[in-house]
Image (cartoon, rainbow, N blue to C red):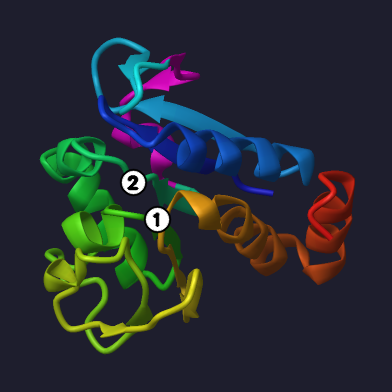
Amino acid sequence: MRPSYVFFADGFEEIEALTVVDVLRRAGMPVVTMSIYDAPEAIGAHGVTVVADEVFDPDMIEDAEWLICPGGMPGATNLAECETLCEILQEQNAKGEKIAAICASPSVIFGPLGLLDGRDAVCYPGMEEGMTGANVLDQPVAIDGNIVTGNGPAAAAKFALTIVAISMGEDVADEVAAGMLLR
């Protein structure tokens, strides 16, 4: 299986980022955490410092299973300001490959990049203005083709399990959820 990448920038939402990494790894998916900076450390929105597996290297990302953007503010804004990351997200989407964003990131990153045009999607409540071209739904997680979006911290586990289900099947997602006492 190809690796998936979760991107970290200062101000990321800890629950969203780390839940995704944890759940995907429980499912046996290879996951690489990647700081968008020249150093591996990123400080979360609530002061938690995380040391990412890798520093930003676009060449590593060429054959990704998933590109995943956690939310949080100003984490989502910091990710959106990384032009190379935005280009990679657009290329991944243009190839029909999988991308995912949760909380502020669908509105701050995916919407402005045009990735949600004509798509069902969700974001953190109150941030719908940035969901350019999207059909914004009122639910925790939305799937539309190759794109998964989640609405916030409370949806982090469901968001991650949706990614697992798409890549590894519902049985694996159910097994991981049961082991976490989510089902």
State the residue at coordinates (32%, 61%).
Answer: 124
Element marked by disc 2: loop
Name the residue: 27% across, 50% down.
Answer: 88
- Name the residue nearer the viewer: 177 or 97: 177
Residue 102's label in the rendered image is 1
Q: Please provide percent x and percent y for residue 7.
A: 38, 36
Hey, what amino acid is under mark 2? Gly
Q: Quadrant of residue 58?
A: top left
Which numbered marker is on residue 178? none
Q: Dot 2 surroundings within 10 Å: few (below 14), some, or many (20 or more)?
A: many
In screen coordinates, is 12 left or right of 154? left
Q: Is 166 part of what is drawn in magenta?
A: no
Specify whether residue 113 is in view. yes
Q: Position of residue 116 (x, y in %)?
A: 26, 76
Mark earlier in primary sequence (2, 1): 2
Question: Between 100 and 107, which is closer to the camera in this rendering?
Answer: 107
> In the image, 28: left or right of 21?
right
| Image coordinates for residue 160, horizontal then vertical, percent | 60, 54
Residue that numbered label 2 is attached to: 71
**Quadrant housing residue 73:** top left
User: Rounded to the nearest whole Å, what is the CA distance between mark 2 and mark 1?
Assistant: 5 Å
Is 12 rendered above or below residue 171?
above
Picture coordinates of residue 23 (x, y %)? 68, 43
Q: Which residues are magenta?
A: 49-62
**Tag 2 near tag 1, CB within 8 Å:** yes
What type is the residue that disc 1 sits on? Ile
Identity of the residue drawn at 16% across and 46% down:
80
Label 1 CA crowd tier, 10 Å (few <14, some 14–19, many 20+): many
Magenta span includes 52: yes
Position of residue 121 relative to residue 92, above or below, is below
